[in-house]
Amino acid sequence: MSTDTPARPSGAALDTVERAAATPEHELPWEALGLKADEYERIREILGRRPTGAELAMYSVMWSEHCSYKSSKVHLRTFGRHTTDEMKKHLMVGIGENAGVVDIGQGWAVTFKVESHNHPSFIEPYQGAATGVGGIIRDIMAMGARPVAVMDSLRFGTIDHPDTARVVPGVVSGVGGYGNCIGLPNIGGEVFFDPSYQGNPLVNALCVGAMKHEDVHLANARGVGNLIVLFGARTGGDGIGGVSVLASETFEDTGPSKRPAVQVGDPFQEKVLIECCLDLFSAGLVEGIQDLGGAGLSCATSELASAGDGGMLIHLDRVPLRDSSLSPEEILMSESQERMMAVVTPANVDAFLAVTAKWDVEAAVLGEVTDGDRLLVQWHGETVVDVPPRTVAHEGPVYERPYARPASQDALQADAPTAERLPRPATGEELRATLLRMTASPNLCSRAWITDQYDRYVLGNTTLATPDDAGVVRVDEETGLGVALSLDGNGRFTKLDPATGAQLSLAEAYRNVATAGARPLAVTDCLNFGSPEDPGVMWQFAEAVQGLAEGCEALGVPVTGGNVSLYNQTGDRGLDSAVLPTPVIGVLGVLDDVSRRTPSGWREPGQVLYLLGTTRDELGGSEWAWVEHRHLGGLPPALDLEHEKLLADVLVNCSRDGLVDAAHDLSEGGLAQALVEGSLRFGAGARVWLDELCERDGIDPFVALFSESAGRVLVAVPREEEVRFNDMCTARGLAHLRIGVTEEVSQETRLDVQGLFAVPLAELREAHTATLPAHFGG
Amino acid sequence: MRIGVVTFPGSLDDGDARRAVRLAGGEPVALWHADADLHGVDAVVLPGGFSYGDYLRCGAIARFSPVMSEVIAGAQRGLPVLGICNGFQVLCESHLLPGALVRNDHQKFVCKDQRLRVESASTLWTSAFEAGQEIVVPLKNGEGGFVADEDTLDRLEGEGRVVFRYLGGNPNGSLRDIAGIANERGNVVGLMPHPEHAVEVGYGPGTDGLELFTSVIASALVSAVGA
């Protein structure tokens, strides 16, 4: 007998329910597991005795910030209050399930969700990012869908910091290594560098899946006598306590190490699991299904049982193990990847096991749905858990954390980037040099070094991907029905004004989907903030959620699900130790025929470039202020959500009717960056004039080029459609102005801003593409 | 014409290969790795992906699967076999083609639209091309560097068995810019780029890849007429 089996809370003997009842005075290490004194007391009240070690393990992981949303819950209810019946029209499954499900018509539904894997990606960039991708894919599978694409939103510290050179290549190869091996196209996302993310990179992964309406599955354990089957990878010692410890505490240089192994991913196992699940779904062998992610079996059993209509009995000793020395507590907490749990009728279980055997996927019948209302877990015949499942899964603590507008907020907003405060370029020569520096800067340079490491073609349905504004994939090969997705966030705007910043992020994602030609339908969000114990951070969070909820209501697109990641901060400088408040917003849109989609650049000469929307002197939180002056202050751009709706509507109609050949959203870097990217997309230059724009909007060429006013899109209109296009904009009352014409694809082609400067595309391309390879290796 | 597409555990582009066969006018037939039966197909495609996770060495385990014994026997009889990416790796591991595929010289996975020159139009899978024709198809792999000893490379060149060559820069360190090769008989072809991802306008760079599939279908018609 091995002597190094982990010590049990009550010594060598198994801590059974019976024993717990008999030894009420026995102290358990609740504090080391992250529980507060009042939380432990509540567990004792619920159970009417002290918990067993296994019960404590379950409560501690399920009541952690990551699983219970205890700090954010009261604010997240805001989304429900702002979701109208009209907004729910396309919603088949809303917030609360593994992922929301949206009806996209023709009998098809899609499910999508974004989730964070921030802390693990700092500790172990490759595995942290890889398992982040793996986890979100299983959420999508758990709805009954075939995953069809992934996206990723990444934020890192300053580009030239030595640790950034460790984290970036690891995260990128982790996202790619996992996604490429399971055969899902990566169709876009974003990458952003800022010193606030130095010790807290953000790795947010999104997955979208598709299914027919009748294939939607839910996570519940119904039907007394139905069997609980665990299938997929074996359970090992990886990621034990990862949820409660890794995701909920900050990293300090001192103090005891709280760094249990980050989970290790096996994409091959996940690929096989995907195909196996799809076979099981299509054969009708699954009554309910749940993925195993954070909190592993503790989460899956308690959530399935509490969403069901009875109790559940689990024989924990039947779990296939990679490490036979694991204790029941560890098995319940393990976050081993690539596992799923299904509820199967006794009549179907042989057929179910035949399918898993076909795919060489290991499966074990762990127990059954019972007619009680308790979740019972047994270990070799002895009961180690006997709890009401809802108290574990859904009735965790809820905190009303204090929040207050930070005293520094006024000074921050007053520090506007005025012309007096920050010198601005004025001459053609100065503007030219600024444009070249801007387009090479970390947040505006080409992402090809990253996206060329991701397979965007697999499954054969990708029709737009980075560098286009949105990723677009076909869902139905017969009809061309498909979806567009964009993932956007702007931490700087959110820092300056959390409510407006969150809305600007939403508006950008919404606009990006519309520029691709898709009708925006639904939203997923990943809310990345600092410590909820800091009232300033909590204020940012509350404001951002309120802004987002109101923004979604105004745009008529419901939030269908997402994730909150708190404690993204290092050090003890309060708010100054926290990351920029970063809501990352994913918007999903639908195209009845993806062949009508619009790319972000032009390729035909002689098309007319129109700027939609108006430009104001809005440089607070802009890339220009940061790149040229390391300045962050003032107010973010103003937002008019009615205008955003109108703009989106016009863009979708233009795309459907073939009135535009290219459309590119104006965001970070303003018009200048949109012109650069639109030209480089297919290598066709442009001739642009700014006089009329400056006169109409009362601005100078610098503001015209670098302001980040919201609600603007650059479009290329074929000459033969110009009249129709003008008529449509005029009739709809949308500000539109002819600002240039496209040039041909050639070696000599240039971006020519008339009367100011011209840059050959070759020079632009060199500046735009050199930055990431220079920092992270060719 | 019925063209089988093998699915190994970990195959990723098997559905895409079946779609390409269909768009080229063939009838795709799904073949299962554990089934030592080709179900009477007229040709076989080994698709891209990471068969069995590629954990030992790319294609090394797939080569021993039950279906491969039939594919190897068929190829030796003259059955047309195309290996794409991981399929090319499997063909090399099976010794149906010489050489091996190693980690890209820059150590990264690469996904890009790749320009190629069709060096040989005399294989069953390239007869619809003109020799010297330039095409663009996606390239996406981490272990695409083709290597072989000098004698083998000279023999491949001398016998006209270099079928595709990279243009516009070598993307992975392949010796002599080799992207694809054939066996002596010209019925077995392997290449790293993915022709099955260039078969539909709007979903990849053009439709240059379709010709590989129409080639083998046309070859079958010719041999049917000839017989």
Image (cartoon, coloured by chain):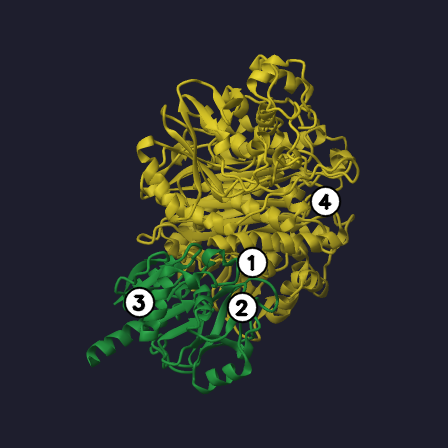
Chain colours: A yellow, B green
Label 3 neighbour load within 10 Å: few <14, some 14-19, many 20+: some
The front one of B96 and A588 is B96
Q: Secondary structure at mark 1?
A: helix
Q: Which residue does the image show at 40% across and 83% down from the upper left?
A: B131
Q: Please, what is the three-letter code of the amino acid marked with disc 1?
A: Thr
Rendered location of residue A441, percent (x, y): 68, 58
Quarter holding the C terminus of chain A is bottom right
Q: Gap between marks 3 and 4, in whole Å?
A: 52 Å
Q: Are marks 3 and 2 in contact (CB under 8 Å)?
A: no
**On screen, A398 above or below B95?**
above
Q: Gap between marks 1 and 3, in whole Å?
A: 30 Å
Q: Gap between marks 2 and 1, in whole Å?
A: 19 Å
**On screen, A186 above or below A581?**
below
Q: In front of the other: label 2 or label 4?
A: 4
Rendered location of residue A635, percent (x, y): 68, 40
Q: Gap between marks 1 and 4, in whole Å?
A: 24 Å
Whether residue A324 is visible:
yes
For disc 2, the marked residue is A683
Which chain's residue wears label 1? Answer: A
Quarter of the view holding residue B65: bottom left
For disc 1, the marked residue is A451
Q: Please, what is the three-letter code of the amino acid marked with disc 3?
A: Ala
Q: In front of the other: label 3 or label 2?
A: 3
Q: Are marks 1 and 4 in contact (CB under 8 Å)?
A: no
Q: Please, what is the three-letter code of the amino acid marked with disc 4?
A: Gly
Which chain's residue wears label 2? Answer: A
Label 2 neighbour load within 10 Å: few <14, some 14-19, many 20+: many
Numbered tag placed on residue A199 in the rendering: 4
